[in-house]
Amino acid sequence: MQINEKRPAFPIILIFCIASAMGNWLLSYIIFQTAGLPLYLDTVFTAAICFSLGLLPGLFTGFVLGLATTFFRYHFILGQIELAGASAVFTLCIAAEVLTICFFHKKWLGAREAAFLRSPAVSSFIGITPLLLTLVALVCIVVSFTGGLIDFTLTSLTTPRPHFPEDIFKLGLLRNNVPILASAILSRIPINIVDRFFVIFGGYGISLLYRKWFGTFQWGPAGRSS
């Protein structure tokens, strides 16, 4: 396998960022809106951009384009303009997720990943699996805390916001006299831990395809150097 560290040209990066933002929206729509599953999966392709291109493209895909798609969905598709602002604030969770993934990838995952990219096989992937699982837990905590803090703030300001699946857990915690802020944070963990598992592992798998298309690395026969 040959590894080429040359970064893709800006137009290619832009195209992949836009395509990834559209992929996030489409996957989330299919899973959450159409199938009715209590999962978001709205940052799978953002994670792929983070793993393959880094921080700035990740923020552009997840935060900037995420804001744009949120306003578009609530204004033109759902017709719930009054909820667009509150929903857009939750995009800060995506920004926090991007920062966490990129920092973790650069600080801890990168060195172990190099061995896997040199010889992509099940045995070498097992070496990075514990790190990806650690990242799942870390992102779950960061997103749950960020989302809970935003939810608590919106509730304190009596700002209208959309209904989320975690509201069921939140109501149960409140009935057991758990403080509002703690309820807002803890209620997100059961959904986020499952959701972020698919986001991290799915995003990492897609990032390998991205990097292959970018020409960052090429697989030879049976994973041998070509």
Image: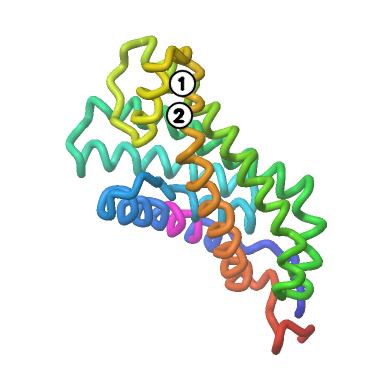
SS for callout 2: loop
Which quadrant of the structure image shows residue 111? bottom right
Bin the neighbour count of mark 2 within 10 Å (Cα to Cα): few under 14, some 14-19, many 20 and up.
Answer: many
SS for callout 1: helix
Q: Nearer the viewer, residue 147 or 173?
A: 173
Query: Where residue 142 sits: x, y (%)?
Result: 59, 33
Task: Locate residue 34 relative to residue 44 in the image: left or right.
Answer: left
Query: Where residue 191 sits: x, y (%)?
Result: 45, 40
User: What residue is rendered at 45% in x and 23% in y?
Assistant: 184
Query: Where residue 204 sits: x, y (%)?
Result: 60, 59
Q: Which residue is mark 2?
A: 187
Task: Locate residue 22 relative to residue 196 in the image: left or right.
Answer: left
Residue type for callout 1 = Ser
User: What residue is rendered at 46% in x and 21% in y?
Assistant: 183
Magenta stretch, residue numbers? 16-21
Instruction: Tell me if label 1 and label 2 are in contact, CB under 8 Å.
Output: yes
Which quadrant of the structure image shows residue 66? top left
Residue found at the very far front of the displayed protein = 176
* Numbered mark located on residue 183 in the image: 1
The C terminus sits in image quarter = bottom right
Residue type for callout 2 = Ser
- In this rendering, the answer to whether 63 lies above or below 152 is below
Is 17 one of the magenta-colored residues? yes
Task: Locate residue 102 relative to residue 73 in the image: left or right.
Answer: right
Q: CA distance from mark 1 to mark 2?
A: 6 Å
- In this rendering, the answer to whether 139 lies above or below 81 is below
Which quadrant of the structure image shows residue 8? bottom right
For the stretch drawn in magenta, what is the main secondary structure?
helix
